[in-house]
Image: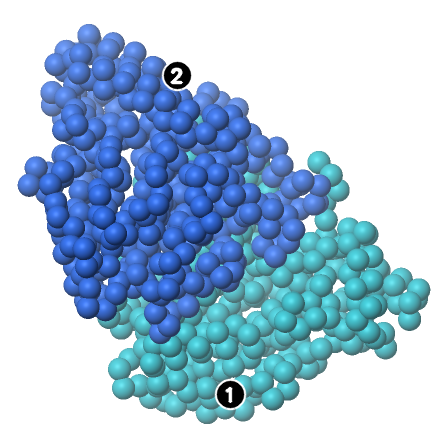
Chain colours: A cyan, B blue
């Protein structure tokens, strides 16, 4: 095996090395079955154990009570953008959104396409989505309030979640789920594309509070109903078995190697301090997110000019630091430092940044 | 590694061993990238090559002209059941279906849920779906004619596809795609859940004739539009990267090791002859499908009584022959012998069946 890259990709992203090694070691014979995990039936005892473990570990890590169900639905967060208003809108009531960037904007669009009564109650578009809005009023009659907990492209993150009173929160946590503990009780639904913090691409993790299931209309397509998945442990049809298997291994790593979400958060805070510290100590690097809205998952920054940024990304890659180019829609640089990126990776990046500044500053 | 099972599962199903070995060998370092294929960005040169190879090999193997596009859409064949009428229905025109079993029935239901004008022009429900209907009349004004090429549960298969004149055929080929060559020109759309003949669970392969894209309505959710996928090489959002990677390796195996679909069909015919020959030579085993409608992919049969069937399935498993239980909705026995099941596997099964008959017949 060649040298392993420090992987700062925004998603698909780094996975814990022990998880990859476990997948590799049992790829031809899953636990004595004589089959690969890629070949076992989703109706088998082997896969039942896999999906049940993924669900149970998710519930334990997030402290979810029995009033929540954990589902796996293909199509990524993008399919959830349309399933949420389709399933959880209430006729005659507005659906409310806070717009903090590209992904929120897409979620809003999919509610509008369906002709829902959409209210965008706050937005940071006035400053290019560089901050998290603090001032807004939630209509107590709203069907739900949707927000995006972490914004991969702009590098912002909610430190404290919005208070919507009795209105259920719905949150796209694709890029920071399992990075920190939080109180799940105000949430009607939480969803996350797997490919950032919990696994490879190919499924969304959907956590739904059971009372939300009562809203699901009868007359929508079967595969777009949350009740289709909740009633069958996500196996109305064949689920994304291998992705769920990998998620179960990542959850095991979170519980047994890291030691839970308090520990994970402490590590993530240390990584963030290191990297933002480097940026703040320098006039060469400029963070693009407002200081009080900075993401601990996606650190976005600029160099003095675009040529230097190109040179930075290219030289970093030569040093084994990959994926540092900003999203194609905004340019600049971005280091995604999800759970699986260790302090060693962030330290190596900071060392490189300091050397690069000395040479080119 | 333990002894490899002869895997007769209906799906997820056996994969070619060289494909599994290649995945395992490069799982920690994909082609010198320093990353696992599970970790590389879908916007990277590595994944671009993967998806382009999967598309190009599919086109070559099936002899698809430039008037076809090859897409990968999550959600399995079950999501296609609703996307097809939503995208390809034409206001004022009927959508026509032939009902040959469980999967066709589900496809019909999803068109009805959407309030489409559904005409079921033929059905074999009168004889428990044990045959393929030969007599039907296609309305030349229909938007499309939908059928299921192979019926995994009942063990039937179309040997010659229906002639619908100018009406585009739409076909669920989940369980026999790539098992034989055919003329793609009458097809407006072909779809297949990956987990039977071409890869692991987690994506559908969708082949669409470009003129069909003109039918896609503007006002449906983004992730349910075929044009969302066709315009972006299936990467409007993050696709099921690992599944597509595995598909590209299975397609390579089909082209380079098997030698194309003519060769694959010859092997499948030989496997079918062996197994149906064993059934026909015996009074102990009874095939459940009409002789002229027998599937070369899923061979369904009964033993004299249910206790013997249970014993058969259990003893076979001890001999390393797995997955022989019939679908839970019909009982009996079923051997799924997709592309990746070799003649050696079928021979081993036939040997076991003959011995079992001698002992218990």
Residue at x 24%, y 59% (from the top left corner): B143
Q: Residues within 10 Å of mark 1 (few under 14, many from 20)?
A: some
Front-most of B288 and A282?
Answer: B288
**Lateral position of residue B243 relative to residue A51, left or right:** right
Residue receiving disc 1: A122
Residue furthest toward the left?
B126
> Which chain is disc 1 placed on?
A
**Lateral position of residue A280 relative to residue B337, left or right:** right
Q: Residues within 10 Å of mark 2 (few under 14, many from 20)?
A: few
Mark 2 to mark 1 CA distance (whole Å) = 65 Å
Front-most of A186 and A229?
Answer: A229
**Lateral position of residue A260 relative to residue B217, left or right:** right
Front-most of B140 and B245?
Answer: B140
| Residue A217 x %, y % | 24, 70
| Residue A202 x %, y % | 47, 53
* The disc label shown at residue A173, or none: none
Residue at x 19%, y 59% (from the top left corner): B141
Residues at marks 2 and 1 on the same chain: no
Residue furthest toward the right?
A359
On screen, A100 above or below B54? below
Q: Quadrant of residue A42?
A: top left
Residue receiving disc 2: B344
Numbered disc 2: secondary structure = helix
Q: Nearer the viewer, mark 2 or mark 1?
A: 2
Q: Is residue A256 visible?
A: no
On screen, B175 above or below A191? above
| Residue A26 x %, y % | 53, 33
Front-most of B298 and B13?
Answer: B298
> Which chain is disc 2 placed on?
B
Residue at x 37%, y 72% (from the top left corner): B218
Numbered disc 1: secondary structure = strand
């Amino acid at each position: 095996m060649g040298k392993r890259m420090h992987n700062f990709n925004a998603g698909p992203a780094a996975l814990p090395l022990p998880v990859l090694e476990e997948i590799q070691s049992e790829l031809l014979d899953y636990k004595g079955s004589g089959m690969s995990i890629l070949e076992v039936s989703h109706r088998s005892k082997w896969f039942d154990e896999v999906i049940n473990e993924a669900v149970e570990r998710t519930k334990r890590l997030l402290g979810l009570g029995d009033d929540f169900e954990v589902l796996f639905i293909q199509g990524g967060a993008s399919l959830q953008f349309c399933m949420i208003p389709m399933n959880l809108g209430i006729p005659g009531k507005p659906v409310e959104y806070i717009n903090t960037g590209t992904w929120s904007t897409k979620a809003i669009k999919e509610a509008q396409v369906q002709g829902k009564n959409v209210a965008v109650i706050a937005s940071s578009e006035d400053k290019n989505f560089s901050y998290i809005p603090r001032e807004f009023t939630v209509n107590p009659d709203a069907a739900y309030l949707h927000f995006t907990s972490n914004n991969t492209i702009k590098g912002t993150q909610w430190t404290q979640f919005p208070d919507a009173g009795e209105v259920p929160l719905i949150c796209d946590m694709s890029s920071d789920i399992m990075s920190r503990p939080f109180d799940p009780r105000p949430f009607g639904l939480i969803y996350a594309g797997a490919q950032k913090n919990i696994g490879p691409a190919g499924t969304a993790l959907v956590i739904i509070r059971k009372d939300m299931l009562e809203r699901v209309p009868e007359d929508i397509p079967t595969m777009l109903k949350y009740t289709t998945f909740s009633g069958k442990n996500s196996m109305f049809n064949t689920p994304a078995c291998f992705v769920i298997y990998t998620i179960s291994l990542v959850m095991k790593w979170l519980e047994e190697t890291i030691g839970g979400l308090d520990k994970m958060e402490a590590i993530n805070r240390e990584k963030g301090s290191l990297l933002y510290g480097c940026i703040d100590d320098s006039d060469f690097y400029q963070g693009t997110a407002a200081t009080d809205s900075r993401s601990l998952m996606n650190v976005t920054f600029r160099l003095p000019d675009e040529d230097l940024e190109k040179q930075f990304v290219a030289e970093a890659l030569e040093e084994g630091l990959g994926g540092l180019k900003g999203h194609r829609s905004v340019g600049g640089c971005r280091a995604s430092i999800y759970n699986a990126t260790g302090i060693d990776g962030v330290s190596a990046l900071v060392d490189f940044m300091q050397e690069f500044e000395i040479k080119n500053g």
